[in-house]
Amino acid sequence: MSGSGLRLAVAWGSVAAFAVFGSGWLASLDSPLWAAFLFAWLFSVIMWAAFGVVHEAEELAHMLGEPLGTLILTLSIVLIEVALVSAVMLSPKSVPTLGRDTMFAVLMIVLNGIVGLGLLIGGLRHHQQSYNLQGTSAFLSVIIPLATIALIIPNFTTSTTGGTLSTLQAVAFSVFTVALYGVFLMIQTGRHSSFFIHDGGQMVRSNADVPADTGTQDKGSVKGLTVLKHIVLLVANILPIVLLSKSLAAILDYGIEALGAPTALGGVLIAAIVFTPEGISALKAIARNELQRAINLCLGAATSTIGLTVPAVLAVGLISGQTVVLGLAPTEMTLLIVTLILSTLTFSGLRTTVLEGAVHLIVFFVYLVLIFSP
């Protein structure tokens, strides 16, 4: 059996096992060893399936080219994130701050942790690395207002208190967020797709410019079947993660409460589970001196996270009647503002060095300390 086949067999076998025996297993979480075993099992399977998602998305990226390939990967990963967050929110023990904590954790992990480590590795290995400034500017021009609307403005509205939004604000902000993200996708995949490719803006000729012949048509058919196969495998790797997310959410809820851990740790764990494979993919790209692909992955993940998670979290809150807290605490708001300013400065030139990586990493380490010692 191939590695991909084994991964799918284990993932779907776990889905079947929890579908049949899960309710009984989750009723025995008062045993620390049993709870740790179930968490390790689900964590390993979900992480392995997430690597499968990354693998299939990278195969599609090679066949479809950039930026479409990277976009498929980021959307797949964010879909997993939304599933995990929604599962925890709909669990018996509601966590009103989970969506906020997860989005903030993603921004800190991606924009400071992965970007910082990546630029440090790239600077040490390649001294300086270049990228397409237009694409990076487009990412940041969307990330900054979306992050501000979602995580800062709720602290200063007067219709409600405690970092929450009124029903009108929740609906309106969701529509605005989706609309802006939709416009960005049109730019990224349409007439300005060259912004996200570091090749001087030169685009490969489309198939319409190439004379059609039988050989070309045959190759096109084979490529179409290959693309379809990888899309099916991509979905087959995503579904077990979505189906197992509810069981993992129950264990996370119990573990955080039993250990007396900070509630923000739940968001950090979800972000780590979801974005570790994509982060490794970005670091590998930087090591190969493919900074543009890494930027597309990192900034694309940040953009997709806010653009899709905010409407999903608010929709779950409105439908289930749960309170959703989006506004960050003052310390976290400060870190977010510093991160956004720092990202703008880091990607304001045409090349990056070790210094930018070191600064981003320091901010990330400060974030980690503040989780356990706010």
Image (tube, helix red, strand yellow):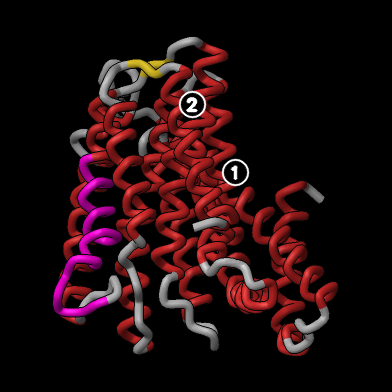
Residue 161 position by quadrant: bottom left
Q: Position of residue 299 (x, y in %)?
A: 37, 40
Q: Which residue is labeled 1 in the image?
A: 55
Residue 358, numbered circle? 2
**Residue span colored magenta:** 141-161
Closer to us: 143 or 212: 143
User: In this rendering, would 128 be left or right of 175?
Assistant: right
The main secondary structure of the magenta stretch is: helix
Residue 355 position by quadrant: top left
Q: Position of residue 68 (x, y in %)?
A: 37, 40
Tell which residue pokes out farthest to the top in this image: 127
Against 19, residue 212 (above or below) is above
Residue 337 position by quadrant: top left
Find numbered disc 1 in the image and state the secondary structure of the residue it sits on: helix
Closer to us: 65 or 135: 135
Please report the residue visible at 52 percent of the width from the left and 76 percent of the height from the top. Answer: 87
Residue 288 visible in the shown view: yes
Q: Position of residue 122 (x, y in %)?
A: 52, 20
Q: Position of residue 313 (x, y in %)?
A: 36, 72
User: In this rendering, would 113 be left or right of 304?
Assistant: right
Against 176, residue 272 (above or below) is above
